[in-house]
Image: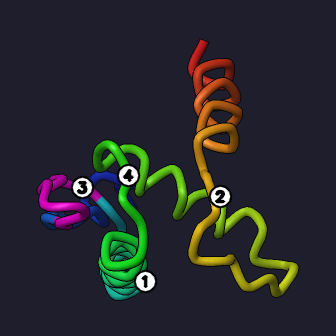
Amino acid sequence: MNIMSDLKLIDVKIADRTYPLKIKSVDENRVKQAAEKINLQLKELRDKYDARDMQDYLAMILMLQLNSQTSVELPANIDFSEQLRTIEHHLNNMLK
């Protein structure tokens, strides 16, 4: 079976941006659920924190996902600046 024939084009909206994705049909629900989860987390963070831009919120979501093995409640007044710089540094290194 041709791999391309098994792919389906869907649009996924994350953080007010639409991303066209080619995915396997069997993965459609999982991908859409992941986007919904990200958008829900994004809304919760936007209601709770004052970040500079959308990238900061998405970096926070990534940080929370990476640390999800440990159940830690974040204080309302936490300063994410240093953590965001560290995450940005790691992401930039991964993209090189």
Most foreground residue, 33 or 47: 47
Q: Amino acid at mark 2?
A: Met
Alpha-carbon distance for marks 2 and 4?
Answer: 14 Å
Q: How is the image coloured?
A: rainbow
Say which label, 3 or 2, has the lower sequence index: 3
Q: Which residue is mark 2?
A: 63
Alpha-carbon distance for marks 4 and 1?
Answer: 29 Å
Secondary structure beneath dot 4 equals loop
Secondary structure beneath dot 1 equals helix
Most foreground residue, 94 or 21: 94
Indicate which disc residue 51 carries: 4
Alpha-carbon distance for marks 3 and 2?
Answer: 24 Å
Residue lying at the far top in this picture: please name it: 96
Q: Which residue is mark 1?
A: 30
| Residue 37 belongs to the span the image colors magenta | no
Indicate which disc residue 21 carries: 3
Most foreground residue, 63 or 14: 63
Image side of residue 1 versus residue 18, left or right: right
Q: Quadrant of the N terminus?
A: bottom left
